[in-house]
Image: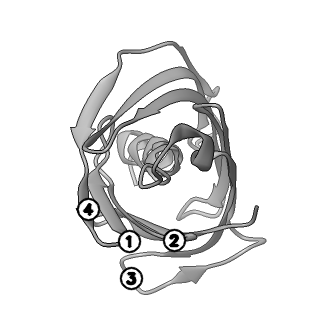
Amino acid sequence: MNVFSSVARGLAVGLILSLGLCGYASAEDLDGTWQLVMRKLPDGTVQTPPAVQGRFTVKNGVAQLVVFWPTPNGTPASLSELSRWEWSENEVAATPLLVIFDDGSGKPALYAVGGETKRTPVARQGARVSYQHPIDAPFIVWEANKLTATLEGEFVDYWERVR
């Protein structure tokens, strides 16, 4: 796996969750904590904690995410992110505030401060909310206290709300 693919995967994991909660009616309902419970890779491999770890908390429109996973060669990779989110009935807007990404290559972690706000439409079908992430490529499906994030050819992550 090249560094670009690894970086894209890591950033996608983090940013995916930031939007996972947009289906709620109001920003106050978004406050809470989510946990990564499983990752499925394209070859059928299933990773669960402690091999892969993820925690996402949102409060007052600010999201904090930490994800840790093994790379294909077995080295640890991680993503930490702080971002601001705004939700409406038909769209979601994401603004990165801080991103720290270690692709597991042994090179120094990448740091990014700030970023452009991007928007994407939201599709609703009853309790199901879905959308393409506005910053990265993952497709998000949210239903009640469960969230799936799919980055085609890379992974499907399964998250559950813990509080």
Identify which amino acid the numbered label 3 is placed on: Asp
Q: Is residue 35 left or right of residue 27?
A: right
**Mark 4 surroundings within 10 Å by alpha-carbon count, few (fewer than 14), some (14 through 19), many (20 or more):** some
Residues 90 and 21: in front is 90
- Which mark sits nearer the N-terminus, 1 or 3? 3
Identify which amino acid the numbered label 2 is placed on: Ala
Can residue 80 be spotted in the picture? yes
Q: Say whether marks 2 and 1 touch (CB < 8 Å).
A: yes
- Which mark sits nearer the N-terminus, 3 or 4? 3
- The Cα–Cα distance between marks 2 and 4, rounded to whole angstroms, is 12 Å
Residues 102 and 134: in front is 134
Residue carrying label 1: 127
Position in image of residue 159 (x %, y %): 58, 68
Judged from this view, the residue extending furthest toward the bottom is: 44
- The Cα–Cα distance between marks 2 and 1, rounded to whole angstroms, is 7 Å
Residue carrying label 3: 43
Judged from this view, the residue extending furthest toward the front is: 25
Can residue 104 be spotted in the picture? no
Identify which amino acid the numbered label 4 is placed on: Arg
Residue carrying label 2: 144
- From what the image shows, is residue 41 above or below residue 63? below
**Mark 2 surroundings within 10 Å by alpha-carbon count, few (fewer than 14), some (14 through 19), many (20 or more):** few
Position in image of residue 106 (x %, y %): 65, 38
- The Cα–Cα distance between marks 1 and 3, rounded to whole angstroms, is 31 Å
Residue carrying label 4: 124
Residue 101 placement: quadrant: top right
**Mark 3 surroundings within 10 Å by alpha-carbon count, few (fewer than 14), some (14 through 19), many (20 or more):** few
